Amino acid sequence: MAQTLPIEKFLPLTDTLPLVDVRSPAEFAQGHIPGAVNIPLFNNDERAIVGIGYKNGGKEHAVQLGLEIVGPKLAGFVKQAKKMAPKKKILVHCWRGGMRSESMAWLFETAGMKAYTLESGYKAYRRYIRQQFAHPVKMWVLGGYTGSGKTDILKIIAKNGGQFLDIEAVAHHKGSVFGPLGQLPQPSNEQFENNLADAWRKFDFSKTVWVEDESRQLGKCVLPDPLFFHVRRAPLIKIIVPKPEREKQLVKEYGRFKKEELREQLVKIRERLGGQYLKEALKALENGDLQTVAGLALRYYDKAYAHGASQRPQENIFELKLEKDKPEENAQKILDFVKNRAFSGL
């Protein structure tokens, strides 16, 4: 008989055992536990048929319909599961931990596998991860005007053993109007939360977690309230990098994109940038003068960042001047800065 586990015990097993989500493809697409494979008991249309059958004829009628639909698929389900689980251990869940996961787990057990189901299903998982973002955390936030190379610096810190929650990578968006360029399609907001939680649960909370200073929303992805609260309340190192260096950074990062793509994004900030500055930026873009385009765009982004920083507790903001866009050197300076603050009791 399959063993049912609470989410606290079930979730760590997903790191080593294959996970089957038996919900419909539409449910799975909306959001799923990272690493799960969808083997739907019913496809979208079949799920609707069974639901209507339950509403019109009750549970017994719905079960009969379900058996008629699922019967021919059973051998295929087992074949898929055995490919996934050569060691014959497998995790299974549905929405509420009800008949769908119980039925599939029974099938896998009958076929000689050991199955574990999730108590209260995906619904319990969603409730659990929301609670985890409220976990007390020692966090440092790296901030600074657009083009300061913050992400590159944090990646160096992570490469050297630090813990970096790369929110932009999870969102497939860099936060600005140019944020979607070169990125994969964004996940649903639900899946964004799930993917953030997957990284979050693997941190050692006795050590520092680094994040980049972000607004609440990146494209269509919105940070969960408890996580955004951490980002806003944590101490922030605001790096001050000369504007010419930041212009060069933007040209390096976005200069590889087609003029049409850059023009489309520039037009989106027409009102905030101002008609005259937009006209100048588009003319410079057409002439291939990307540094001028970057400088004009920074007029808007610098004001926007200054406004966002003003919403933070000012006593939590520490400025650090950096002369060049040299991620490895700057990462070390930032780590030394934090170390000195720790020794001084700040």
Image (spheres, rainbow, N blue to C red):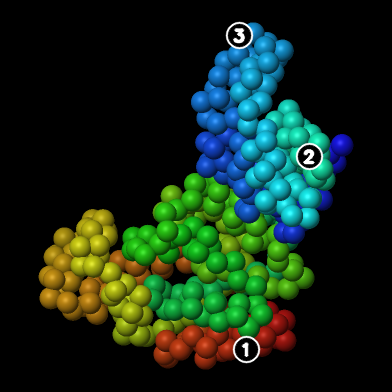
Q: Which residue is mark 3?
A: 56
Image quadrant occupied by the N terminus: top right
Residue at left offset 58%, top offset 34%: 24
Q: Residues within 10 Å of mark 1 (few under 14, many from 20)?
A: few
Q: Is residue 154 positioned above or below 216 on the image?
A: below
Q: Is residue 157 above or below residue 130?
A: below
Amino acid type shown at disc 3: Asn
Helix, strand or loop at mark 3? helix
Q: Nearer the viewer, residue 193 or 18?
A: 18
The percent position of residue 120, horizontal first and vertical second, equals 75, 36
Residue, disc 2: 111
Q: Is residue 313 visible?
A: no
Q: Is residue 104 left or right of residue 196?
A: right
Q: Is residue 65 visible?
A: yes
Estimate the x, y position of residue 29 in percent, counting from the top left: 52, 42
Where residue 105 sits, quadrant-wise, is: top right
Kind of residue sitting beneath label 1: Asp
Q: Is residue 231 shown left or right of residue 89?
A: left
Which residue is at 64% across, 61% downward? 199
x, y percent for residue 172:
46, 60
